[in-house]
Image (spheres, rainbow, N blue to C red):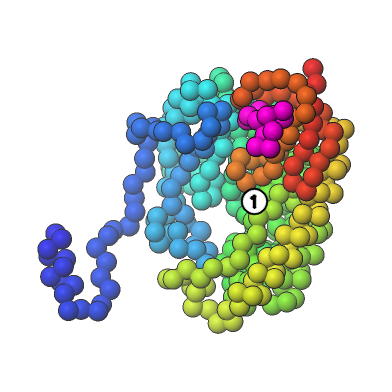
Amino acid sequence: RIAEILAEKSGSDVQLHYVGDPDFIYDETLPRLNSSPAWYSYLKIGEGCSNCCSYCIIPQLRGAYRSRPLEALVAEAEMLAGRGVKEINVISQDITRYGSDMSDGTTLEKLVRRLAAIDGIKWIRLLYAYPDGITDSLIELIRDEPKVCKYLDIPIQHISDPVLKAMKRRSSEQQIRDLIAKLRSEIPGIALRTSLIVGFPGETLEDFTKLTHFVEQTQFDRLGVFCYSKEEGTPAAEMAEQITERVKRERYRKLMRSQARLSFRHNRTLIGTTEQVIVEGYSEETELLLKGRSSRQAPDIDGQVYITSGTADIGDIVTLKITDSSDYDLIGEMVE
């Protein structure tokens, strides 16, 4: 139909659309080339997004959330385990939506239990769980299943109710605070990561000050901050009171400086404790040091652990005693 479409478009400035709503969902029969190191992999459990936040174009580009079949995911994870993968990082735009579009009772909890039963898989990490979708049963699963890392990535984006409402987020300030308190009460020692957006249209100094105080009070283990960026075709791009790039950068730097201080302070409390660490190779600075990650550190986005003594193969999970720390990294030695 290319010639027909070109003829129809010729001489017209009207935008025409010829693509239907995205509905493709891949399965385990498609070839899978793992671009991650051999010992860990990402398992994408769904495609698209149904949250429709005012700043995000993904629902328009990728369609509504579509869960992959549970058996297909288990088969893929078994294949990865057969290749030597020990750590599965469960991802999608919102993992708590998994199964919500199905009528067979599929849930995220059922999937994770099936993944935990696979021989060879040692760690299961849950990434990108929207706060309003975190249920009591999911909290209990993270607490009670030994293979599930005591780690949760919860993108809250902001804490000021006016900003959350403008973003079309479904959680309020109080709901977010209550959830964090419950997670820390029910799962002692859990590592919490979040992501925040600064400079959203209409974000006042009062809103940003509240966000800064919240970060200092809550003391997330990991924190990512992003400057708001206009996406053409989204409601937020048309909002009044767009924030200047200078103000966005200033707010970004202030939050990241605060988080660096908090992270340093928290890491100092870990000195003398023991951590399970997956060995990932030699340090970039010297081959005299091995490096790895603890179960409290996700690949690519969190810090590392530098190993000063002991020997191990890449991909081994070893016990380390933490002896020192920096802003985001830990230093330790192997123990028997």
Instruction: In this rendered view, identify the residue nearer to me: 101 or 117.
Output: 117
| Image position, residue 321 (x, y; %) | 82, 28
Neighbour tally class for label 1: few under 14, some 14-19, many 20 plus, Cα within 10 Å: many
The answer to whether residue 298 is above or below residue 9 is above
State which region is magenta: 279-293
Residue drawn 71% across the image and 20% down it: 311
The answer to whether residue 166 is above or below residue 113 is below
Instruction: In this rendered view, identify the residue nearer to me: 52 or 123.
Output: 123
Name the residue type under label 1. Ile
Residue drawn 48% across the image and 27% down it: 80
Label 1 sits on a secondary structure element that is: loop
The answer to whether residue 284 is above or below residue 327 is above
Residue drawn 47% across the image and 56% down it: 50
Left or right: where does residue 231 sit relative to residue 15? right
Residue drawn 65% across the image and 59% down it: 225
Instruction: In this rendered view, identify the residue nearer to me: 4 or 265.
Output: 265
> Residue 121 lies in what quarter of the image?
top right
